[in-house]
Image (cartoon, coloured by chain):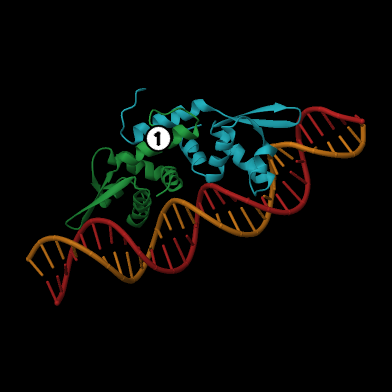
Chain colours: A cyan, B green, C orange, D red
Amino acid sequence: MGMNETLKAISDPVRRDIMNLLKGGKKSAGEIGEHFQLTGATVSYHLSKLKAADLIAEERYKNFIYYQLNTSVFEEVLSWIYTLGGIRNEND
Amino acid sequence: MGMNETLKAISDPVRRDIMNLLKGGKKSAGEIGEHFQLTGATVSYHLSKLKAADLIAEERYKNFIYYQLNTSVFEEVLSWIYTLGGIRNEND
DNA sequence: CTCCTATTTAGAAAAAAATCTAAATAGTGG
DNA sequence: CCACTATTTAGATTTTTTTCTAAATAGGAG
């Protein structure tokens, strides 16, 4: 909620790695964690930040939680940065 | 240099305020500082971050340093976020 | 119901970023 | 050269963010 939260979420390299990973399709928290040398708790922390910023969405199945990119929010970020840069955007 | 530095620079609200201020044209460090309840040293710190990320450029005149937005870098940020979001971009 | 696995939450510790005060630099103008 | 103003740099402190360990939750499988 709010561009500040979204940009803060994107500004961390681990979280960007997670987002890149999710471009390949939905993955469980555990599968995501396998790609990092971080504890599950830390990965969970990053996932919660991404989720709070609405950059990812979760879906529960059995006792797994699957995460996936929420593309629509990227559109908003882009639009916002267009404006910040004083660049004219088709959408406004 | 590097998208990480750029995104970190953009992720701070004070620095975004500075960038918005500079949309109205070039301003000296002192003029920029007037808009914030921060010491000159702190404003200088933020300016150095923006400059390191190449988001602003400086120009010296008398003993003032004028800062202005460096629009071209925004294009790169946009392109990068397109890619992160898996959104197809005209430029690649 | 009980055990097991996946994930999150709580709380503490470590690391990084923002801020301040004081001092340094640099350029102006006399 | 000297005094003045604008800005930055240094160093310390505060605040925020990231990370960890240990414990809690939640949901399925037997």
- Foreground residue, C11 or B91? B91
Badge 1: chain ID:
B
- Foreground residue, B13 or B56? B56
Image position, residue C25 (x, y; %): 27, 67
B68 relative to A75 in the view: left or right: left
Residue displayed at 57% across by 31% down:
A56
Which quadrant of the view contains residue B69? Answer: top left
The quarter of the image holding the C terminus of chain A is: top left
Image position, residue D15 (x, y; %): 50, 51
Q: Which residue is mark 1?
A: B78
In the image, residue A72 sits, relative to residue B9, either above or below, namely above
B2 relative to B32 in the view: left or right: right
C28 relative to B79 in the view: left or right: left
- Foreground residue, B76 or A75? B76
Image position, residue B19 (x, y; %): 33, 41
Residue displayed at 34% across by 47% down:
B54
Instruction: Indicate the amino acid at tag 1.
Output: Leu
**Element marked by disc 1:** helix
